[in-house]
Image: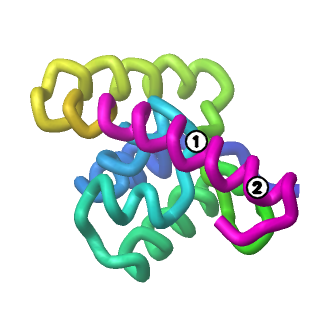
Amino acid sequence: MTQPLTTLELLEALAEPTRLRIVNCLAAAPLFVSDIQTLLDIPQPTVSRHLRVLRDVGLVRDTAIAQFVLYRLRRPAEPLGRVFSSVLEAAMTDPDLRSERTSAFDQGRRHSRTRTDAYLEGRPA
């Protein structure tokens, strides 16, 4: 059994700018690695490395869909859930983060539907 997330682990995970940007985007919609890579304009290995850190501390969970992996937020239990929610709320006051979250919402809807439909129909996306 894994240990519960500590305050220090939560704050360390969110203190890294790229991880904060990823979490901010995932607050809008579940996303694939390629979606995050496109939205944030960072290389796929960098995205994967940061997602692994976020998954290891329990802030994201992954779901395999065919050859793709869909990532979504996993909110911590209270009281850390309130801290996490406050960070996400504060991110909306930053114009760049707000813009990324809006783009993530659009991208997540578009690509999740396309890939899921393709998988269900048995064809490559």
**Residue pictured at 33% horizontal, 61% vertical:** 38
Q: Would you say the residues marked 1 and 2 are in contact, meaning their CB atoms lie under 8 Å apart?
A: yes
- Judging depth in this view, the residue of 73 and 115 nearest the camera is 115
**Residue type at tag 2:** Thr
Write down the region rendered in magenta. 102-125
Say which residue label 2 marks. 63
Q: Earlier in the sequence, mark 1 or mark 2?
A: 1
**Residue type at tag 1:** Pro
Is disc 2 placed on a helix, strand or loop? strand
Spatial separation of the CA atoms under disc 1 and disc 2 = 10 Å
- Judging depth in this view, the residue of 2 and 69 nearest the camera is 69
User: Residue 15: within the magenta?
Assistant: no
**Residue pictured at 70% horizontal, 56% vertical:** 62
Q: Is residue 87 above or below residue 23?
A: above
Q: Is residue 37 above or below residue 6?
A: below
**Residue pictured at 38% horizontal, 39% vertical:** 104
Residue 73 locus on image (x, y percent): 59, 39
Give the color scheme: rainbow, by chain, secondary structure or one colour.
rainbow
Q: Is residue 100 above or below residue 70?
A: above
Say which residue label 1 marks. 30
User: Which quadrant of the figure contains the C terminus?
Assistant: bottom right
